[in-house]
Structure formats: structure tokens, C-alpha cells
Image (tube, rainbow, N blue to C red):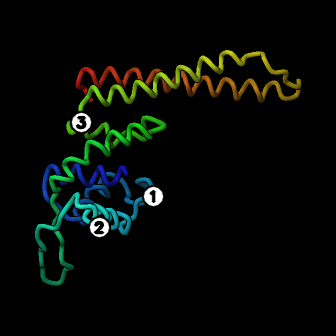
Amino acid sequence: MAIQIFILSKLMEENTYPYKLKKQISALQPLDTVNGLTESKLYYHFESLAKQGFIEAKEVIKEENRPDKQVFAITAKGREVLPKKIYKLFENAETIGDMVIGLANMKYIDRDKAISLIEKKLSSLKQKREYLATLDGHFPVEPEKKVFVNFLEDYSKYKIEGSIQFLERLIEHIRKEEI
């Protein structure tokens, strides 16, 4: 879903072709390190978006001794679906890292709705933190496993607490329109 959001958001800015986006992504980091994205997957997503009517071919650029370049544009249907895809990304995200492409495209969505989706994640994490706190000392642990169990408990608390703090910061940045 993230790559489709990326493609649609780039087409909101200008008509483009897959190879140009591949070069833009590759300039930032090797293509195959972007969530396992390959050149063929990128082209697949262009085809998929076209089949769904979210983008359409506008022209073909022909150059001597080079493959033809099919230039795409976003459709009205694509403009309508982009915010929905971003909201879905926020709903499905397990970490802030999963939200990055949505956060980079906040200008296409309602900030209050994004905050509401993130606040649901925050509330869920706080409930999880409270639940874990109720478990402290309720289960007998064999002495030889005490260090291991304590380590895992500390790690879980650390991850949850860190996620809570960063989600709170994220919400504040979105409210202030800094992100």
C-alpha cells in the first residue's frame, strides 16, 4: 500500500513515468532496500493502479535507442482514493515507521482525522501498558528463569513506553502542522 501512496502522491505533483520514480527512490537508497521493492514490483503497482482507474497513461515518450516511456497522470478517482489509502495506512500501522509515507503526505488528508487514528493507537498502547502492570508478580517464576522473565518484562515496558512517548510527540507535531 505504501508504494501505491508514494506513486499517487508523486502523480499529484506532476505526471511521470515509472523509471523516473525508480531513479528518485534509488537516489535516496537502493531500490531493493525499500521494503523489498524491486523494479518489477514498482511497474506492477503502476499497472495495478491503472487497472483500478486511479492513474492513466497520458503519453508515450519515444527516444532513439531507448525503450518507450509511458507517462502517467492521476485520475479524479485516484485523487479521491489517495486520502483513503493514507488513512488505511495509519489504521494498519503497527509502528511510526509504518506511517512514514502517510506522514510525508499529510497535505492530502484531514489532520484531525489522522490525529484521531493515531490517538486510537495511543489509547491501545496505554491499555496494554496498564494490563502489563496488573500482571507484575501474579505468576510464579522459577528461580532459574527470573532473570530472563525480568529482562522480557523490562523490554516490553521499554518498547511500549517509547512508543507512547513518540506517538504523543507525533500528535503534537501534527497539531502544530510541523509534520
Determine whether label 1 and label 2 are within 8 Å by CB: no
Pointer 1 local density, CA inside 10 Å: few below 14, some 14–19, many at least 20: few
Left or right of residue 162, residue 68 in this image: left
- Label 3: how many Cα within 10 Å (few below 14, some 14–19, many 20+): some
The residue carrying pointer 2 sits among few (fewer than 14), some (14 to 19) or many (20 or more) residues within 10 Å by Cα, namely some
- Vertical placement of 106 versus 43: above or below? above
Secondary structure state at the residue bearing disc 1: loop
Q: Which residue is mark 3?
A: 109
Residue 170, image x, y percentages: 36, 25
* Tag 2 residue: 47
Is the residue under label 3 in contact with that under label 2 (CB below 8 Å)?
no
- First reached walking from the N terminus: tag 1 or tag 3: 1
Please identify the quarter of the rendering in which residue 132 is found: top right
Q: Given the image, on which type of amino acid does mark 2 rest?
A: Glu
Residue at image location 33% in from the left, 62% down from the top: 45
Q: Nearer the viewer, residue 73 or 162?
A: 73
Q: Quadrant of residue 7?
A: bottom left
Q: How many marks?
A: 3
Q: Earlier in the sequence, mark 1 or mark 2?
A: 1
Looking at the picture, which amino acid does disc 3 mark?
Ile
Q: Secondary structure at mark 3?
A: loop
Q: Residue 48 at what x, y percent from top left? A: 31, 64
User: What whole-number distance in Å separates the C-alpha atoms at marks 2 and 3?
Assistant: 25 Å
Disc marking residue 102: none
Counting residues from the start of the chain, the first of labels 2 and 3 encountered is 2
Q: Is residue 37 left or right of residue 59?
A: right
Give the CA separation, mark 1 to mark 2: 18 Å
Q: Amino acid at mark 1?
A: Gly
Query: Separation of disc 1 and disc 3 at Cα?
Result: 27 Å
The picture places residue 13, in percent across and down from the top left corner, at 14, 49
Vertical placement of residue 17 versus 156, above or below: below
Q: Tell me the residue that label 1 is attached to.
A: 36
